[in-house]
Image: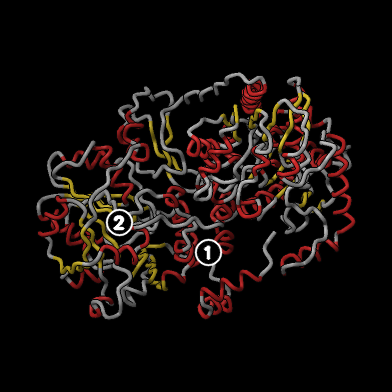
């Protein structure tokens, strides 16, 4: 039996040619003769190309300077292709040529790599060749990729038509399965990349002879390597090993790295096989680190960190129990921690058998049923990118089997004690991230401010929270809100007296500690009114824990920019104390010493001295403004909308025109949303000055009422450095103000001019 394989192989890309070779060998092991159809898509593999853009001119200048090495690499790719790929005698250049060809196959296989990614082909459309649209032969798919989490808009029907011709469908990533299901209603098996169908011994037989003496750290980065650089530096320092950089990106990953520019596929295999450590941000770099069981660290794109369920690297490593080898997140492995190879190999062997079983069934045109994932040992909780740390799961657990433990980013996550857990499922039923949330009517919006000047001056904006808190306290109730202690640790506390409300006033740009608070709220609700103020996820967590909203509970959520790491803030506090040589007594994150719209970060020390500077001119304020160290769930926050959870929502009324409330703007104006009938009743009792305000305008001034904040591209690099390097050094690198000329240019240039400058600058490689 003979199959025709449609895949990428000719791009002089290590992953492309190795996966093509692996697919052919896997088919041969199942008794099939496989031939790769030599279809040359629109790719230019010449070393020197016409300099059509400034970036291309820079590219050619670099290639010309290293021509001898790049020519050796080119020849090595061609030699490997001739030696290890069974290609058609004829090269085809179009769909039409293939339609007219007499192809001697029993079926066609759409193979791996991003052959189903429409954005890489001319016109941004699918290439029908890679769906076998030129032939009536039976078609199967083995691990093709769409190269993205979602299809471009309007392409589902086209994809559905192509997929209808396939008897068996599989994909490389979970995101691909979702795309196939949404477009066609069919289920696709998620199988291993073809390179993983072969064993380490199979690949070692194809590797070049060893030429590098001694041990070394191998670095293979195909894009910016910032999250890996602290690991490379520390490994080099602690082991004393040389750094070899297999060139994907031209920028050196280490000052003393030796660049390897002439490696072909066989040399690539040899370098991975013999490395003492590997640092990579390549998927296939990760694959071969796993196959050869090299201690490795890998970095992924910010979008993959934000949505790991749609990442091919996370998909593989989580399947093998090696997800801690991804750097720049709170559960990353320590520098000298060894991968858990025995367990990983056992899982890889099982996954390989499953993938080969799919391939065998597809080749024989037999049904295939993908094995379901086995249930984990512990209860189902929200994954790390969705968990808000609200503490509801810990509070509801009847056996106290769940505790909140800080991770490497300084955020608290639930940790389950398997000895105490009785699998009752209460935590799963309570977790807000695992439940749906009802839509509410559009809230009523108001501009509001406190009538007492002293309270308003002591508040971040208009002092609306204090009016609400006073109302509850006057009725014999208790107020729960966030307060800093003497060591600048932020936690929710109960306030029973007006005299203590000052501790709860003002913005605190850090996530608060809720340990034990929900149970304390529940106890208080048995005898009195309670006001709970917090972020929307904290309010929702409280409701889920209580099983609803008791009549004597009033809640107030905040327009939340995102919650910064408590660990980072506390390290920043110690950093400030070291710089000043004295201890912090208290901090005001937004002090109105120069008015509401020019908030200051004010630090008061134990000797009575005071520092105050505009918030966004401080190191902490600058990093907070860039959303550098927010909790990972904040970048995909489901509460960033006008569908609010609290009775009230409080924030600053940004976006006022100069002629709107001109006498009030210097003193501070609160945005107050009334979200529920209970909130409306309480609102009518409050001694606030208020003005109705259009909700649409409120959203324009507070974008977090419409969508979450975007994840900054250097977040992973920050937390990678935070995990390994002295905090003072991390602050200097990531939080310092840019040089004065850069700041001046930033203020002087319009956004349009900045965009034009970026277009003409050479792209980083």
Q: Can residue 323 be seen?
A: no
Q: Which residue is at the front of the view, 246 or 368?
A: 368
Element type where label 1 sits in the image: loop
Q: Which percent across, then down, holds residue 262? A: 85, 50
Q: Quadrant of residue 144?
A: top right
Q: Which percent across, then down, holds residue 45? A: 79, 53
Element type where label 2 sits in the image: strand
Identify the residue under disc 1. 735
Q: How far apart are marks 2 and 1 (CA)?
A: 26 Å
Residue at (45% x, 64% y) in the render = 625
Circle 1 residues within 10 Å: few <14, some 14–19, many ≥20: many
Q: Which residue is at the front of the view, 758 or 150?
A: 150
**Depth-wise, is mark 2 or mark 1 nearer the camera?**
2
Give the quarter of the figure containing the C terminus: bottom right
Q: Can residue 496 be seen?
A: yes
Side of 251 relative to 607 (left or right)? right
User: Relative to residue 427, is residue 14 depicted above or below?
Assistant: below
Q: Which percent across, then down, holds residue 234? A: 68, 50
Q: Quadrant of residue 545?
A: top left
Q: Which residue is at the front of the view, 725 or 655?
A: 655
Q: Extreme front residue here?
A: 100
Circle 2 residues within 10 Å: few <14, some 14–19, many ≥20: many
User: Relative to residue 660, is residue 607 depicted above or below?
Assistant: above
Q: Earlier in the sequence, mark 2 or mark 1?
A: 2
Give the quarter of the figure containing the N terminus: top right
Residue at (26% x, 59% y) in the render = 650
Tell me the tag on residue 105: none
Residue at (65% x, 38% y) in the render = 133
Q: Which percent across, then down, holds residue 604? A: 37, 67
Identify the residue under disc 2. 558
Side of 47 relative to 384 (left or right)? right
């Amino acid at each position: 039996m003979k199959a025709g394989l449609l895949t990428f192989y000719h791009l002089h890309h290590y992953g492309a040619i190795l996966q093509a070779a692996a697919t052919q060998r896997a088919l041969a092991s199942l008794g099939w003769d496989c031939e790769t159809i030599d279809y040359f898509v629109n790719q230019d593999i010449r070393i020197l190309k016409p300099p059509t853009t400034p970036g291309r001119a820079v590219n050619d200048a670099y290639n010309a300077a290293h021509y001898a090495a790049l020519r050796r690499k080119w020849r090595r790719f061609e030699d490997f292709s001739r030696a290890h790929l069974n290609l058609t005698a004829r090269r085809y250049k179009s769909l039409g040529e293939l339609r007219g060809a007499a192809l001697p196959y029993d079926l066609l296989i759409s193979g791996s790599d991003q052959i189903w990614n429409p954005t890489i082909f001319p016109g941004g459309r699918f290439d029908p060749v890679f769906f076998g649209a030129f032939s009536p032969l039976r078609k199967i798919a083995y691990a093709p990729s769409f190269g993205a989490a979602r299809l471009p808009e309007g392409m589902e029907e086209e994809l559905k038509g192509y997929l209808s011709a396939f008897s068996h469908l599989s994909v490389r990533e979970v995101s691909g399965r979702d795309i196939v299901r949404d477009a066609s209603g069919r289920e696709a098996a998620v199988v291993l990349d073809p390179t993983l169908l072969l064993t380490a011994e199979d690949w070692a037989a194809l590797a070049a002879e060893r030429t590098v003496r001694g041990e070394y750290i191998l670095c293979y980065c195909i894009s910016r390597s910032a999250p890996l650089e602290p690991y490379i530096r520390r490994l080099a320092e602690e082991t004393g090993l040389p750094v070899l950089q297999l060139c994907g990106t031209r920028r050196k990953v280490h000052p003393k790295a030796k660049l390897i520019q002439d490696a072909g596929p066989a040399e690539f295999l040899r370098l991975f096989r013999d490395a003492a450590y590997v640092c990579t941000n390549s998927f296939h770099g990760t694959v071969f680190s796993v196959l050869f069981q090299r201690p490795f660290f890998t970095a992924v794109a910010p979008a993959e960190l934000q949505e790991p369920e749609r990442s091919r690297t996370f998909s593989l490593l989580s399947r093998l129990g090696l997800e801690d080898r991804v750097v720049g997140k709170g559960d990353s492995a320590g520098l000298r921690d060894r991968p858990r190879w025995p367990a990983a190999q056992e899982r890889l062997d099982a996954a390989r058998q499953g993938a080969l079983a799919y391939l065998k069934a597809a080749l024989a045109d037999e049904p295939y049923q993908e094995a379901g994932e086995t249930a984990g040992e512990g209860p189902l909780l929200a994954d790390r990118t969705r968990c808000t740390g609200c503490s509801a799961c810990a509070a509801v657990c009847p056996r106290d089997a769940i505790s909140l433990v800080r991770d490497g980013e300084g955020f608290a996550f639930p940790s389950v004690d398997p000895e105490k857990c009785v699998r009752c499922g209460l935590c799963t039923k309570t977790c807000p991230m695992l439940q749906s949330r009802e839509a509410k009517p559009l809230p009523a919006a108001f501009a509001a401010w406190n009538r007492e000047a002293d309270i308003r001056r002591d508040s971040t904006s208009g002092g609306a929270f204090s009016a609400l808190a006073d109302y509850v306290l006057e009725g014999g109730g208790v107020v729960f809100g966030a307060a800093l202690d003497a060591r600048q640790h932020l936690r929710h506390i109960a306030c029973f007296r007006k005299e203590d409300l000052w501790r709860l006033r003002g913005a605190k740009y850090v996530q608060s500690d809720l340990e034990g608070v929900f149970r304390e709220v529940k106890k208080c609700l048995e005898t009195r009114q309670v006001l709970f103020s917090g972020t929307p996820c904290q309010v929702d967590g409280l409701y889920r824990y209580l099983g609803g909203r008791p009549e004597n509970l009033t809640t107030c959520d905040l327009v939340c920019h995102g919650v910064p790491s408590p660990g980072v803030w506390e390290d920043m506090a110690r950093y400030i104390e070291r710089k000043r040589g004295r201890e912090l007594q208290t901090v005001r994150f937004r002090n109105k010493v120069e008015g509401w719209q020019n908030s200051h970060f004010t630090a008061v020390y134990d000797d009575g001295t005071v520092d105050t500077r505009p918030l966004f001119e401080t190191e902490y304020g600058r990093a907070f403004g860039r959303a550098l160290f927010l909790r990972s769930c904040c970048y995909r926050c489901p509460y960033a909308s006008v569908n609010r959870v609290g009775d009230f929502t409080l924030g600053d009324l940004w976006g006022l025109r100069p002629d709107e409330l001109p006498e009030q703007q210097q003193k501070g104006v609160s945005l107050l949303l009334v979200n529920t009938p209970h909130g409306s009743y309480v609102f009518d009792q409050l001694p606030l000055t208020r003005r109705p305000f259009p909700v649409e305008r409120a959203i324009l001034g507070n974008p977090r009422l419409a969508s979450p904040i975007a994840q900054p591209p250097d977040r992973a690099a920050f937390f990678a450095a935070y995990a390994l390097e002295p905090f003072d050094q991390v602050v200097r690198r990531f939080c310092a103000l840019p040089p004065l000329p850069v700041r001046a240019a930033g203020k002087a240039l319009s956004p349009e001019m900045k965009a034009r400058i970026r277009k003409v600058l050479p792209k980083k490689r």
